[in-house]
Image: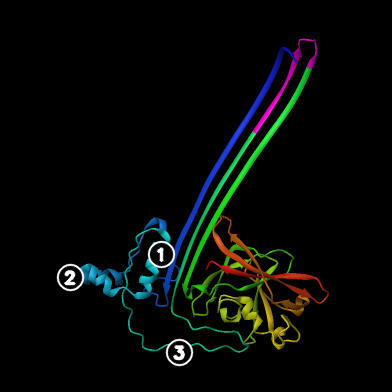
Amino acid sequence: MRIDSAQISMTGSHDLHREYLREETLRFWRDTPTSFPADSLIPIATDQVSVSTQARNLATLSGNSSCPKAEIDHISEDPRLRTIRLVLEVLTGRKIRATTFKEPQATEVPTPSTPSDGGIPQPDRVGWGLEYDHSETQIEQEKMTFSAQGTVRTSDGGILKFEIHLATSREFTSSTELHLRAGDATLTDPLVMNLNGQSAELSDLTVAFDLNNDGNDEVLPQLKPGSGYLFLDLDNNGIATDGSELFGPATGDGLSELAHLDQDNNGWLDDNDPLFKKLKIWARDAAGNDSITSMATHNIGAILLDRQSTPFTLTGSNNVLRGRITDTTTFLREDGTPGTVQEIDLAV
């Protein structure tokens, strides 16, 4: 082929998008509200510290002491808090300074908790908790396109017209998560019944509820319509009284708690198990109206106690973490149609 002349048009495009997201939070509390408020949330990256009046008074006393500061810190630091501080320093690569102080002497010695009626285990509380969450996400997307078209005249009088398009792309996503729970911080995952065939979703609406069964209300995210929290009505009052009646807040493993009710050990919770009929579903609509229904209301005949790991992050409208789905299993209605049960770690 010998080209005499040509008219060629070529276009191309290239787009490269890189995104790096990092979120890091630390939450620490003790049952005595003068130490750390239960709703305090400290972003690690800001290096911001709030000091209570009691801590400032102790700092003043320390300043008047003749002992070296390093010696005072070494003596006064709670061994548990020191362990947590060292772990977080390794995890974050940051130097963390912690101040401890003694609480007023308690007038009563707490008694160990005992198992509640119905076989759901209730562990002893330690009176403090720590939640550390770290997540990093790296996203890289690249696209390239090429187009060419033209008319070519050859030396033998031929005319050739051509058109060609080329497109290629790549995408890379890397995500790492680290979640550290200590003390009472692991007690935050109830079971959810999905009645509409969809996966559980959390709304931006909340309800005050004593999820950890410690006498203090947590801010519990509401489920979107079609799902409800599964609970065992131990006191027969027709409502979910607190977290002791839900499955999961006590041990961090709701399905294992539910399995304690499987009296015939067939791997299903069904009519062969005496407490099956006492199971209820608690849902709340956008207007704040509670709905308490039974297994019979939804024609549910059995719940499978086996599970499948199904990790999924649940976020709010501003991509704020609301919770995480950890495991999923199924239930069967009397006519054989299935539904799902999910265990959700709530960010409360």
Residue 23 visible somewhere in the drawing: yes
What is the chief secondary structure element of the magenta stretch? strand
Q: Which mark is residue 64?
A: 2
As drawn, the residue found furthest toward the right would be 335
Q: Which mark is residue 88?
A: 1
Q: Quadrant of residue 196?
A: bottom right
* Mark 1 and mark 2: Cα distance apart in space: 31 Å
- Report the amino acid beneath label 2: Asn
Question: Residue visible at 43% across and 79% down?
Answer: 127
As drawn, the residue found furthest toward the front would be 1
Disc 2 residue crowd, few under 14, some 14–19, many 20+, Cα 10 Å: few
Residue 57 visible somewhere in the drawing: no
Pointer 3 residue: 111
* Mark 3 and mark 2: Cα distance apart in space: 39 Å
Compared to residue 285, the image places residue 273 above or below, namely below
Question: Residue visible at 75% across and 17% down?
Answer: 151
Q: Position of residue 157 (x, y in %)?
A: 80, 10
Which mark sits nearer the N-terminus, 1 or 2?
2
Q: Position of residue 14 (x, y in %)?
A: 60, 34
Secondary structure type for disc 2: helix
- Choose between 316 and 25: the one closer to the eye: 25
In magenta stretch: residue 155:
yes
- Report the amino acid beneath label 3: Thr
Q: Which residues are magenta?
A: 145-159
Which mark sits nearer the N-terminus, 3 or 2?
2
152 left or right of 91? right
* Mark 1 and mark 3: Cα distance apart in space: 32 Å
